Structure formats: structure tokens, C-alpha cells
Amino acid sequence: WEVQSDNRILSSVCDPSNPMQLFYQSLAQKIRNVGLGNGKCLSGEYGVEILFQECSSLRDDQSWPHDADSQRFARGGFCLDYSPNFGSTNAHPCHGGPNQMFYFQEETW
């Protein structure tokens, strides 16, 4: 995934040299972006736009547990959901469709 200039999140080829590429911190369960600064995390919930905001351990809407078996990021019955028609990622009720499945490669740095 990567962040566009209008803050939309689009699927993309994994490219560690791309500053807009997203990365997942599994222990903190946060999705971050290098180009937006280390202090920005993916935030949002159902009915609210998903975007990057200041990271905070006090914000439940920044926790995105990833289930490796289903390949979903789910919280409270809602999953990250990529809409190819609109080219955006939102939170929607989990339904198990391929647009809610996200694969990421774990890196050690």
C-alpha cells in the first residue's frame, strides 16, 4: 500500500525505497508511513474517513490487529476494506471478501 497526495490509500507494489509506502508495526498494531513522519498512524473507524493522524497510545481507532489466517485487519467487527471503484480504503463490516485481505511482508531492521 501507499499514501497518495490526497491521503487516499492505494494498493501498490512493495518498494522499500518509496517514502509513501506503508508499514505495519505488529507489536503496536499500528499502520505507519515513512514519508508522513514517524509520528503519523492510520486512524479511523466505520463511518469516519480513514486517514493519517498523530500517533497516540490513547486512541483505539489507531489499533489495527492483523489476523494472518484471514489476512484481515479487523477491529470490533469492522475491517479495512479497499474499494477499487473509488480507489480508497475504509472501514466496513467484515465480510471475508478479497478486498478486505491484505498481505504484508515482515521486515527486520
Image (tube, grey):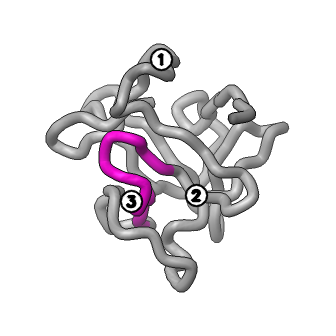
Residue 106 in the image, given as x and y percentages of width and height: 72, 32
Q: In the figure, 11 relative to 73: above or below?
A: above
Residue labelled with disc 1: 15
Amino acid type, residue under disc 2 in the picture: Lys
Residue under the point 34% across and 33% down: 20
108 relative to 8 in the view: left or right: right
First in sequence: mark 3 or mark 1?
A: 1
The stretch in magenta equals: 32-44
Q: Is residue 35 magenta?
A: yes
Q: The C terminus appears in which quarter of the rendering?
A: top right
Residue under the point 60% across and 45% down: 24
Q: Residues within 10 Å of mark 2 (few under 14, many from 20)?
A: many
Residue under the point 38% across and 59% down: 40
Labelled disc at residue 86:
none
The one nearer the camera, 1 or 83, is: 1
Labelled disc at residue 30:
2
Q: Residue 27 lies in what quarter of the image?
A: bottom right
First in sequence: mark 2 or mark 3?
A: 2
Circle 2: element type? strand
Amino acid type, residue under disc 3 in the picture: Lys
Residue under the point 52% across and 32% down: 99
First in sequence: mark 2 or mark 1?
A: 1
Residue labelled with disc 3: 40
The one nearer the camera, 88 or 92, is: 88
* Distance between the alpha carbons at the discs numbered 2 and 3: 10 Å
Circle 1: element type? loop
Residue 13 in the image, given as x and y percentages of width and height: 47, 14
The one nearer the camera, 108 or 2, is: 108
> Mark 2 or mark 3, which is nearer to you?
3
Q: In the figure, 32 relative to 71: above or below?
A: below
Question: Residues at badges 2 and 3 in contact (C-beta under 8 Å)?
Answer: no
